[in-house]
């Protein structure tokens, strides 16, 4: 529990570091609010066989640009995954995630973030808390409002209640993002992988993948390509 709180406090501190920078210039994006939807697949061999469940997720996302070259995202998601084989259980998934990005180049952002996520079944509730470090490439298409998203990250800290913590965790994402005068939209595919320490001949592994979309309303100044 102490470790989980330390992770949350560390992520919060990282999100606040940029608040002392210069103000956002006129004509730059000041943020947007979006509705988010996704279809997810969860896989685990914790029960000794492959546990597979799938289902929809829905939620909200807020994107803020408090100072120039600094971006902050908050995402709230929830949904129910249905078991897809006899060893799987139906589960409810709820997640609160945060990420701070520093735009190092027009096409590159360095990121720090994390999430707290709960998996609830009829038998148990498991809470995951993470710290995530990574980078996101954002190549534009002919300097237009459409750009690609290529993201990779490591999770050096992952705390799981009631179980051993993973010794290796990483994530990746790819997609497309579009910004207009008043609206913004994105389609992304993300994968998270967690490998746990070996116990005898058994090695636990879990994976969560999501195909998602968001549509949002721009708040503040008209966006322009970075």
Image: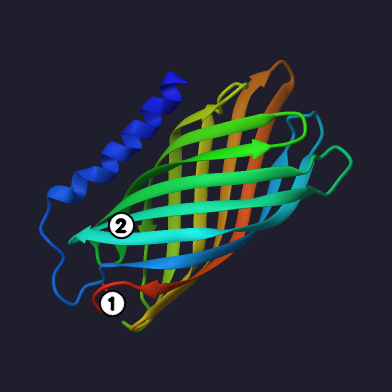
Residue 89: horizontal and vertical position, in percent? 80, 39
State the residue position of label 2: 109
Q: Which residue is drawn at 49% across and 60% down?
A: 60
Residue 98: horizontal and vertical position, in percent? 40, 47
State the SS at label 2. Answer: strand
The total number of labels drawn is 2
- Toward the viewer: 199 or 85? 85
Quarter occupied by residue 120: top right
Using residue 91 as the reference point, say whether residue 31 is left or right of it.
Answer: left
- Toward the viewer: 147 or 124? 124
Whichever of callouts 1 and 2 sits on the residue coming sooner in the sequence is 2
* Alpha carbon separation for disc pair 1 and 2: 17 Å
Quarter occupied by residue 177: bottom left
Using residue 216 as the reference point, say whether residue 190 is left or right of it.
Answer: right
Task: Return the mark for residue 214.
Answer: none
Q: Residue at x 27, y 41 (%)?
A: 14
State the residue position of label 1: 223
Q: Residue at x 39, y 60 (%)?
A: 62
Residue 82: horizontal and vertical position, in percent? 78, 50
Residue furthest to the left: 22
Quarter occupied by residue 127: top right
Residue furthest to the right: 86
Q: Can the viewer see residue 197? A: yes
């Amino acid at each position: 529990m102490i470790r989980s709180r330390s992770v949350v406090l560390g992520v919060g501190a990282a999100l606040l570091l940029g608040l002392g920078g210069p103000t956002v210039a006129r004509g730059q994006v000041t943020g947007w609010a979006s509705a988010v939807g996704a279809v997810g697949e969860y896989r685990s061999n914790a029960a000794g066989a492959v546990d597979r469940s799938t289902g929809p997720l829905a939620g909200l996302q807020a994107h803020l640009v408090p100072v120039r070259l600094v971006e902050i995202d908050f995402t709230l998601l929830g949904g129910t995954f249905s078991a897809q084989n006899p060893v799987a259980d139906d589960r409810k998934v709820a997640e609160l995630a945060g990420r701070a990005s520093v735009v190092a180049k027009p096409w590159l952002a360095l990121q720090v973030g994390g999430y707290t996520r709960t998996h609830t079944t009829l038998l148990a509730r498991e809470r995951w808390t993470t710290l995530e470090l990574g980078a996101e490439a954002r190549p534009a298409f002919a300097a237009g409002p459409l750009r690609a998203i290529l993201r990779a990250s490591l999770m050096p800290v992952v705390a799981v209640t009631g179980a051993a913590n993973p010794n290796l965790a990483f994530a990746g994402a790819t997609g497309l993002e579009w910004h207009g005068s008043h609206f913004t939209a994105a389609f992304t595919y993300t994968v998270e992988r967690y490998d746990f320490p070996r116990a005898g001949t058994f090695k636990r592994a879990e994976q969560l993948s999501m195909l998602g979309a968001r549509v949002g309303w721009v708040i503040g100044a008209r966006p322009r390509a970075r």
